[in-house]
Amino acid sequence: LVRIFLLHRLLPLARLRDLLGTECCRLLLRLQAVTVMVGCRLLPVEEALEKVDADASSCGDCFCFSNIKLWPVDGDLLIATDEQTWPCAGFEPVMYLSDDSFALATAAPRGAVRRVLDVCCGSGVQGIVALRNY
């Protein structure tokens, strides 16, 4: 899973199905969090779902890649953002997390407060971390 969601490497579709199970794999495809390809051709979602539902041999020539990035933040918290390099006209990705995001999340005070405001701060990770801690 690190290979596909953190390192953004291709993963055989059969392997993803083995790791996550058919239902989870179907969900990721329907949400378009994962795309399946055969050779250089991207499969439409419905065709990819048929491959997942069929026997393991039908997945043999299929590989998949993630359309999202998972970022480990603040212990067991994972933040999902869009893959920033998707070549699509009009695509407006969710802001990625960078070193300053991690530094701010780590350095934020953890004292009791009544309110926290996170305005125009990129991905919203500061507000999510604050929600967990305050």
Image (tube, rainbow, N blue to C red):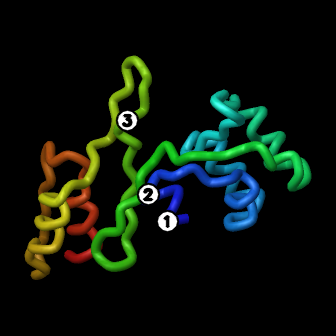
The disc, 1 or 3, on the residue closer to the chain's N-terminal end is 1
Left-right relation of 26 to 5: right
Q: Position of residue 115 (x, y in %)?
A: 13, 65
Q: Position of residue 86 (x, y in %)?
A: 42, 32
The Cα–Cα distance between marks 1 and 3, rounded to whole angstroms, is 19 Å
* Residue bearing mark 2: 7
Residue pictured at 62% horizontal, 54% vertical: 11
Residue pictured at 24% horizontal, 52% vertical: 124
- The three-letter code of the residue at mark 3 reads Thr
Left-right relation of 100 to 62: left
* Vertical relation: 128 (above or below) 133: above
- The three-letter code of the residue at mark 2 reads Leu
* Residue density around tag 2, few if under 14, some if 14–19, many if 20 or more, within 10 Å: few
* Residue bearing mark 1: 2
* Residue bearing mark 3: 85
Q: Quadrant of residue 49?
A: top right
Label 2, secondary structure: give it.
Answer: loop
The disc, 2 or 3, on the residue closer to the chain's N-terminal end is 2
Along the viewing direction, whichever of 132 and 66 lies nearer the viewer = 66
Q: Position of residue 13 (x, y in %)?
A: 71, 51
The Cα–Cα distance between marks 2 and 3, rounded to whole angstroms, is 14 Å
Along the viewing direction, whichever of 82 and 125 lies nearer the viewer = 82
Along the viewing direction, whichever of 61 and 97 lies nearer the viewer = 61
